[in-house]
Image (cartoon, helix red, strand yellow):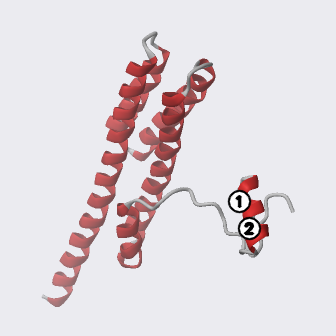
């Protein structure tokens, strides 16, 4: 049953240690966690039933962009701790920043698209790994912050619009 776990649909493979520990303890196998949910994700999940369809669509789009930025963040951290064969990590970083640039442009987030493009060029430059890592970490942190800000603005704008409609219906 490659790729399957008891009681779940297709999920990532568990590391051998997790499978062995579950077999020894008799614990039920659960899907692997991708990390702790970010505070904004919990906030947005609480608001999901109250948002308009347009806002929910925008939130889903921003959530997908957040997932992609999280993937790039993982690659940046791998690059930061790598000691040898840095070129093999720079290639996927360039590719992911290039894709991220296109997705941001498609979502109408031009400043973030420009930031992703500048990070794509920064990876190509010949400089020390520590300097590149610092630049990439700052950029990813900025992207995550701006996405969170955009998510909050979508929620607040939708609340204001709903409050205005409610006031208009009553008055």
Name the residue tied to disc 1.
18
Q: Secondary structure under badge 2?
A: helix
Q: Work out whether residue 139 can be spotted.
A: yes
Tell which of 135 and 162 is nearer to you: 135
On-image quarter of the C terminus: bottom left
Q: Nearer the viewer, residue 65 or 78?
A: 78
Q: Residue extending furthest left? A: 171
Placement of 104 over or under 19, stated as above or below: above
Task: Give the residue furthest to the front.
Answer: 24
- Mark 1 to mark 2 CA distance (whole Å): 6 Å
- The location of residue 112, given as percent across then percent down, is 36, 37
For residue 117, which quarter of the picture?
top left
Asked whether, in this view, residue 95 is left or right of residue 167, the answer is: right
Q: Residues within 10 Å of mark 2 (few under 14, many from 20)?
A: some
Residue found at x 40% / y 29%: 136
- Residue 46 occupies quadrant: bottom left
Residue drawn at 46 percent across, 9 percent down: 126
The answer to whether residue 23 is left or right of residue 80 is right
Is residue 109 in view from this perspective? no
Residue 127 locus on image (x, y percent)? 42, 11
State the residue lying farthest toward the top: 126
Most distant residue in the bottom direction: 170
Q: Residue at x 49, y 33 (%)?
A: 76
- Give yes or no for contact between labels 1 and 2 (Cβ–Cβ under 8 Å): yes
Residue corresponding to mark 2? 22
């Amino acid at each position: 049953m490659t790729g399957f776990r008891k009681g779940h649909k297709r999920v990532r493979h568990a590391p051998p240690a997790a499978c062995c520990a579950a077999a020894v303890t008799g614990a039920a196998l659960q899907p692997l966690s991708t990390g702790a949910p970010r505070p904004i994700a919990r906030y947005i999940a609480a608001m999901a039933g109250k948002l308009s369809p347009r806002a929910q669509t925008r939130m889903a789009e921003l959530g997908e962009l957040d997932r992609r930025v999280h993937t790039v963040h993982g690659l940046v951290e791998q690059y930061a701790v790598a000691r040898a064969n840095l070129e093999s990590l720079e290639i996927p970083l360039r590719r992911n920043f290039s894709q991220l640039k296109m997705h941001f442009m498609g979502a109408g987030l031009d400043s973030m698209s420009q930031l992703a493009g500048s990070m794509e060029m920064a990876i190509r430059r010949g400089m020390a790994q520590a300097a590149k890592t610092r630049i990439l970490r700052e950029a990813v942190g900025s992207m995550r912050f701006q996405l969170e800000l955009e998510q909050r603005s979508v929620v607040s704008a939708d609340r204001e619009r709903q409050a205005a409609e409610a006031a208009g219906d009553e008055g």
